[in-house]
Image (cartoon, rainbow, N blue to C red):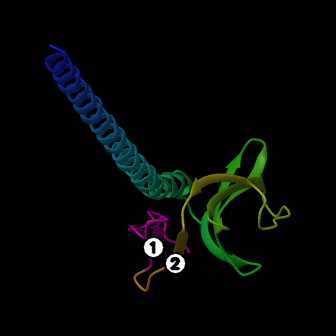
Amino acid sequence: MTNQGNQGKKTWMVSLISLVLILGIFAVSALFLVNIGVQVYKNIVTANNDNFELRTSLSYIATKVRQADGAGLVELRDVDGIRVLVLGEENEDGAFETYLYFRDGYLYEHFMEKGGYFEPGYGMETFEVASFLMERTKEGQLYFRAENRAGDWQELYLTLRTDTM
């Protein structure tokens, strides 16, 4: 009976070790899959945020230009080597200008009195984009091109109602 008892203990130990081994492989596999899922989720969120910044930056510019679209109120300037979109505004408090420009990975907005002092870096960071181009086309349209960190880009053409640029 001793031989049969030892045989039963060995079978029980082999079964226990096999079960622990299977559970260990399952746990490691589950952690590996969760880690892959987290990385995929992070990449999706980053891509969505980059695309949001890209689309929203152009939509923001379009809205600002349409709001300021008046005779002589929309202008592209070069200030200290930086292309600036200048949007004029006049109200009961006086004449003001909004400077929209790209610098160091951000689209900035700077609101000030007309003729006020402007220095690159002034204003509020509005959107994070890798590059932002502002030009006037041969046809007279305003052309904007934004690119995000992933290398995706979108462009926008605007025709002013009061074209005096």
Q: Which residue reaches farthest top? A: 1
Segment tinted magenta in the rendering? 140-165
Quadrant position of the N terminus in the picture: top left
Q: Which residue reaches farthest right? A: 117
Quadrant of residue 93 in the image? top right
The kind of residue tagged 2 is Glu
Residue at position x 16%, y 24% in the image: 7
* Residue 94 is one of the magenta-drawn residues: no
Residue at position x 54%, y 62% in the image: 129
Kind of element beneath mark 1: strand
* Relative depth, front residue between 68 and 162: 68
The kind of residue tagged 1 is Tyr
Mark 1: few/some/many CA within 10 Å (<14, 14-19, 20+): some
Q: Which residue reaches farthest bottom? A: 138
Percent coordinates x, y for residue 5 in the rendering: 19, 16
* Relative depth, front residue between 52 and 63: 52
Q: Which residue is mark 2?
A: 135
Kind of element beneath mark 2: strand
> Residues at badges 1 and 2 in contact (C-beta under 8 Å)?
yes
Percent coordinates x, y for residue 110 in the rendering: 72, 56
Q: Which residue is mark 1?
A: 143
Residue at position x 46%, y 68% in the image: 147
Q: CA distance from mark 1 to mark 2?
A: 5 Å
